Amino acid sequence: MKIVVIQGPNLNMLGVREQQVYGPMRLEQIHAQMKDVATQNGVDIEFYQSNLEGEIVDRIQECYGDADGIIINPAAYTHTSIAIRDAISAVNLPTIEVHISNIYRREEFRQKSMTAPVCTSSVIGFGPFGYHLAMVGMMQILSEINAMRQAQASTAQQGEVEE
């Protein structure tokens, strides 16, 4: 099981920028905690951060055939990027959108997510802990998908035996 975590613009500045909104935790600390959870659960995890929309689109596309799920914080691109939305839709992988702050309590322009409608779920407003919640949620989703595939394979095998 492999999860790719994609971080959008300015998230490399966590712990420095607007601590009253995003808190003092740095991105490296968030990733270290996620890696611990992944290791404890036998999950492969990769991290990627870019300030450039096209690079984020490229990384999402690279997940096709290589990853089982995506956890993404598109940051400011959440509200503007049809390209990121289309990339998420195209790869058709379970995807959880994460936002550290509660976007619905912020400026009006931040209250519309272009990407959420094509994501499996969203975790919003839990601070850095939201990434942990997304990890738990993604592991559950992927476990359910695997169980469904195994059940379908078993049913198909039984059908072949009966013929």
Image (cartoon, rainbow, N blue to C red):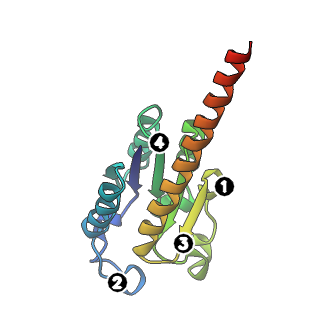
Residue 60 image offset from top left, x and y in percent: 45, 42
Please tell me which residue is depicted at 38% across the width and 50% down the height of the picture. Answer: 52
> Where residue 117 is drawn, which disc sits there?
1
Q: Earlier in the sequence, mark 1 or mark 4?
A: 4
- Indicate the amino acid at tag 1: Pro
Of circles 3 and 4, the one toward us is: 4
- Indicate the amino acid at tag 2: Gln
Q: CA distance from mark 3 to mark 4?
A: 22 Å
* Quadrant placement of the C terminus: top right
Tell me, yes or no, whether the two marked residues, 2 and 3, touch with CB atoms within 8 Å.
no
Residue 157 image offset from top left, x and y in percent: 64, 22
Q: Earlier in the sequence, mark 3 or mark 1?
A: 1
Q: CA distance from mark 3 to mark 1?
A: 14 Å
Q: Earlier in the sequence, mark 2 or mark 1?
A: 2
Say which residue label 2 marks. Answer: 19
Q: CA distance from mark 2 to mark 1?
A: 29 Å
Judge left or right: residue 149 versus residue 16: right
Of circles 2 and 3, the one toward us is: 3
Tell me, yes or no, whether the two marked residues, 3 and 1, touch with CB atoms within 8 Å.
no
Tell me, yes or no, whether the two marked residues, 3 and 4, touch with CB atoms within 8 Å.
no
- Indicate the amino acid at tag 4: Asp
Please tell me which residue is depicted at 47% across the width and 62% down the height of the picture. Answer: 136
Say which residue label 4 marks. Answer: 68
Residue 7 image offset from top left, x and y in percent: 39, 57
Q: Residues within 10 Å of mark 3 (few under 14, many from 20)?
A: some
Tell me, yes or no, whether the two marked residues, 1 and 4, touch with CB atoms within 8 Å.
no
Q: Residues within 10 Å of mark 2 (few under 14, many from 20)?
A: few
SS class, disc 1: helix
> Where residue 124 is drawn, which disc sits there?
3
Furthest-top residue in this view: 163
